[in-house]
Image: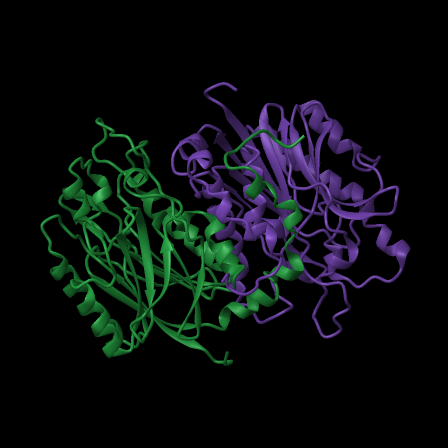
Chain colours: A purple, B green
């Protein structure tokens, strides 16, 4: 790869998608942001998790047909095709999150990378599914990702997208250091992700400011510790009365936030990402080959939950 | 363990220790800070890495006798015994970093935990040794940890110190997410560490503000992601003209800095650490048993350095 490599990198944050909003309307919003990103120098746009629908895991849904409406059975499908077409026309690549229903009836919280030629170059199925699978009658809303999705079966993978190495993850994955490490061990240069984060924690009375601060410090530290760019697109604002945090960001391998959305609506942020800046870290402080000691990390794969101190 | 558990937790940052300073003088400073910490409600004090001497890995030392002066051949030894005695008298436990020379002639960058009864309850030998082993003639100073120390052979361990579970690490370990994860998988409640971080990066022209910001975000994210308290004590200021960063901190499991040293001199910071606050995270967002997927983390132990994307 050449020595002076930059990437015009955009994050397209989305305001609320309500239950009544059609796929066509949503795809229209995505296309509008794609065009804005292009006009501001971007070559790649990151869209949110479950970008095509409301964040439906907040609802307990018993009717199978009603539930199925939130899933995509093919990709691209006729409703999403206009986004693929416009991106190919503009020579833009993108990341998109959506609910996937496979021909075998399996359900995943999925994201894809689409290259500038309009082809799907990579797929990810969310591994760290948060929330629960039971109906919490006393909660103000549900967080049913463990009911509506299986744990992803594709692993954390890195894809060469138009000569840049992209790693993918989704939402809650961004809080887990394992996510980024598995991607940087595959030489990822950019980690892209979408998210939907409710402003209220239904499990305990978490101070509201932590919802944003923990989102940010997790990505800042991981960008630095893995010498990668991190671009995170939220779907936010108030969906039918249920509020989610914004603060979509682009973080440099220095751990610094270089672009941040300041609304809770559709908003495009763009940076010119120097892909070489991570090299200073990869060659020195985080020269993995020189400094890592996997023989001392074995508990990370040998234990699932926390246990007793080693004897 | 009881349901309302708090720990009076102090960090004793140290200003410069120059080459001319005697062990006795240094131990006197540690004792003074131990007393101050006690008077301000602390039960445990964290002292820096290589607390008893200057940060000697900055010097290329060829004379073996001159080098050996920086190492402790026994612990406690007569020069350090007054610190052990005072801590036992005050019923304080502490963490202390020093250079260890074993009877077999092995050299480690070591830390110990000493309990309130004055007994060494745990030992750690630094795993992530930064720097180099060759003589860099063009550098303003050296960073010879890879020359003067072996990689630690004791792993990352958790010790029950007076009914609180402590994990230990040292300096550069704090930048590696594996460190904290291996400790939290052993149910660590508090991670204690000392550090010496030069203000200048000899490897590349790193902006000076990053030396502090990356130090802080690494510990903040890791405290949160592992639901542990992190207490970090720096040796800082200008040692014989070589400047090191300060900003010793105590970080809560929320990722928030609850105490921070603001000088580059001997300075004690104290907090009353609620050991239960991590439980909210351990039971929900970071319920490891429920949410982790080690089958997707295998690259963390299967690769040392970064490689090609998985096929």
Q: Is residue B275 above or below residue A245?
A: below
Q: Is residue A69 above or below residue A90?
A: below
Total numbered badges shown on the rendered structure = 0
The image position of residue B125, as x and y in percent, is 36, 52
Decide if residue A238 is on the left or right side of residue B230. right
Name the residue at 48% across, 80% down: B4
Name the residue at 48% across, 58% down: B183
The image position of residue A240, as x and y in percent, is 72, 60
The reply to whether residue A176 is visible in this rendering is yes
Q: Nearer the viewer, residue B256 or B304?
A: B304
The reply to whether residue A258 is visible in this rendering is no
Decide if residue A131 is on the left or right side of residue B252. right
The image position of residue A269, as x and y in percent, is 55, 39
Residue at the limit of the structure toward the top, as seen here: A2
Name the residue at 46% across, 34% down: A289
The image position of residue A263, as x and y in percent, is 56, 50
Q: In which quadrant of the rendered view does residue B97 lie?
A: bottom left
Q: Nearer the viewer, residue A105 or A113?
A: A105
Residue at the limit of the structure toward the front, as seen here: B104
Q: Is residue B97 above or below residue A221?
A: below
Q: In which quadrant of the rendered view does residue A185 lie?
A: top right
């Amino acid at each position: 790869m050449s020595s002076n490599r930059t990437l015009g990198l955009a994050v397209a944050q989305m305001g609320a998608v309500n239950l009544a909003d059609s796929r066509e309307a949503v795809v229209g919003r995505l296309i509008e942001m794609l065009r804005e990103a292009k006009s501001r120098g971007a070559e790649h746009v990151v869209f949110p998790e479950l970008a095509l629908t409301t964040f439906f895991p907040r609802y307990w849904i018993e009717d199978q047909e009603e539930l199925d409406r939130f899933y995509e059975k093919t990709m691209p499908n006729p409703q999403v095709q206009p986004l693929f077409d416009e991106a190919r026309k503009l020579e833009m690549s993108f990341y998109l999150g959506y609910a996937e229903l496979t021909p075998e009836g399996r359900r995943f919280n999925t994201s894809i990378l689409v290259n500038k030629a309009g082809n799907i170059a990579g797929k990810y199925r969310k591994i760290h599914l948060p929330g629960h699978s039971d109906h919490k009658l006393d909660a103000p809303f549900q967080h049913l990702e463990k009911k509506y999705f299986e744990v992803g079966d594709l692993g954390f993978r890195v894809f060469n997208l138009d000569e840049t190495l992209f790693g993918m993850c989704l939402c809650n994955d961004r809080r887990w250091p394992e996510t980024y490490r598995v991607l940087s061990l595959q030489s990822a240069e950019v980690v892209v992700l979408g998210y939907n984060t409710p402003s209220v924690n239904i499990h305990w009375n978490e101070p509201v400011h932590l919802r944003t601060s923990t989102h940010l410090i997790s990505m800042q530290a991981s960008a630095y510790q893995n010498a990668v760019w991190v671009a995170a697109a939220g779907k936010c604002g108030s969906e039918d009365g249920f509020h989610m945090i914004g603060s979509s960001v682009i973080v440099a391998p220095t751990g610094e936030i270089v672009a941040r959305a300041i609304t809770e609506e559709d908003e495009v942020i763009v940076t010119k990402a120097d892909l070489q800046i991570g090299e200073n870290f990869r060659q020195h402080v985080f020269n993995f080959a020189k400094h890592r000691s996997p023989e001392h990390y074995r508990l990370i794969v040998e234990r699932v939950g926390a246990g007793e101190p080693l004897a």
